[in-house]
Image (cartoon, rainbow, N blue to C red):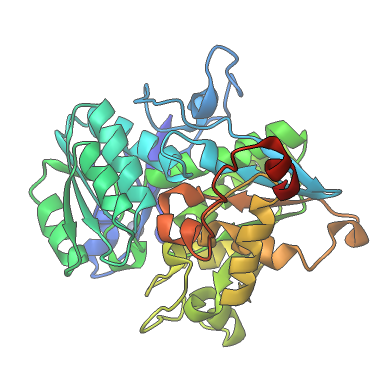
Amino acid sequence: MPELRCRICAAAYPIGPLFFGCPACAAQGRKAALEVHYTQPPAKFPDPTKTGIWQWLDLLPCTDGVSLGEGGTPLTLLRPGLYIKNESCNPTWSYKDRAAAVSISMARQFKLPATVAISTGNLGNAVAAYSAAAEMRCTIFCNPDAPELQPALMQLYGARVFRGGNANALVRQYVERGTVFPATICCPLGGFANPYAIEGFKTIAFEIWQQLGRVPDRVFAPAGSGDGLYGIWKGFRELRDFGLTDTVPRMIACQAEGAACYAKALATNASAPVPIRRPRTVALSIAEEYGGYPALTAIRDSDGDAVTTDEEQILWAMGALAAKGIALEPASVTPFAIASALDPQQQDETWVLIGTGSLAKWPPLVTQGFALPNALPPDFDNLDQLM
Ligand SMILES: [Zn+2]
């Protein structure tokens, strides 16, 4: 049976709507995050009667799922030793669908009628869509820098959307009412977190293990708040802890130079991600002021690293991957930007890049520098010359 367990004092609690960290630690004036812990090995793993993330139900906290067909995304070979997990193939075109599917399933299990999330775009769309599927009220606090297509889509899914403001404090007040599920990604150091989203992200690790037939040597993941990277690490850790694999991959956090909270923490041997006063990068989905403590522990525990790339390289990677048939947003191509200069074969290794979301939700980036196609000429001779 799964339970919630404190990351600091190891106190255990039944699965429930606990969003303000460990009560035992709080009683001693300490902030500590809870996470889902499984006390028994999975029996049916994968479960052949289910699809997508629900094949892994034995290591998920839900009893059943709100589903739009998430998970089961392709693992595509880019060159020998280098694969990309193309998460743009999820229902709202990003890996946040995995987190939203588990979060909204838990909200339904807890009989909470409403959901809320803070988002630059991808998470907001995922939470809005899954809330719609579960017939729940949904409120999204959207980053004002997101292209207008993002809040427009959220509204189309039926969410109430607000732009900008001090969303963290407002969300906390809203959740304290006790009728709202915070389907949001947050840094649990603040004592306020959703422990269930991570369970959705970890299914990426299970799928990679299934698709490769083994655990890769390195996993390159874009990292902002870091819940995605931490979730994938937790998945690999569970595979090892339950004896399904012997090894775990090194987790490589991929960051933009203008938002390098983990790279700076490693460089200065800091115990927490270094806050970035004004994150600046075209990779808006990982332009976070505050990184997550769990992601930093995943990097260190896996003997991993945090690597940065610059704006020029990110835009190059976006075009280079699209030229291979995979159109991903700037944050999602940071792993490719970083790994493309290196050769896994030289080290006799297998690497997997996490392509977290589609470029299609970022219209200004698609059309920037784009020339209108030629008008169709009236006869074939002229057309032949143009072709
Ligand atoms: Zn505790």
Which percent across, then down, holds residue 279? 41, 78
Q: Is residue 72 left or right of residue 141?
A: right
Residue closer to the observer: 187 or 79:
79
Residue 189 appears in the rendering:
yes
Percent x, y for residue 101? 38, 34
Q: Residue at x 64, y 72 (%)?
A: 313
Snapshot quadrant of residue 241 = top right
Q: Position of residue 98 (x, y in %)?
A: 45, 38
Ligand 1's quadrant: bottom left
Against 272, residue 97 (above or below) is above
Can you say whether 9 is above or below 325 in the image?
Answer: below
Compared with 212, 355 (above or below) is below
Q: Residue most toward the left?
A: 177
195 relative position to 206: left or right = left
Q: Residue furthest top?
A: 49
Q: Residue at x 52, y 77 (%)?
A: 260
Residue 226 appears in the rendering: no
Q: Can you tell which quarter of the image residue 240 is in?
A: top right
Image point (43%, 78%), residue name? 280
* Residue extending furthest toward the bottom: 268
Residue 370 image point, x, y percent: 53, 60
Left or right position of 93 against 385: left
Q: In the depicted view, which residue is nearer to us: 212 or 321?
A: 321
> Which image quarter holds the N terminus?
top left
91 sits left or right of 66 in the view: right
Q: Is residue 31 above or below residue 64?
A: below
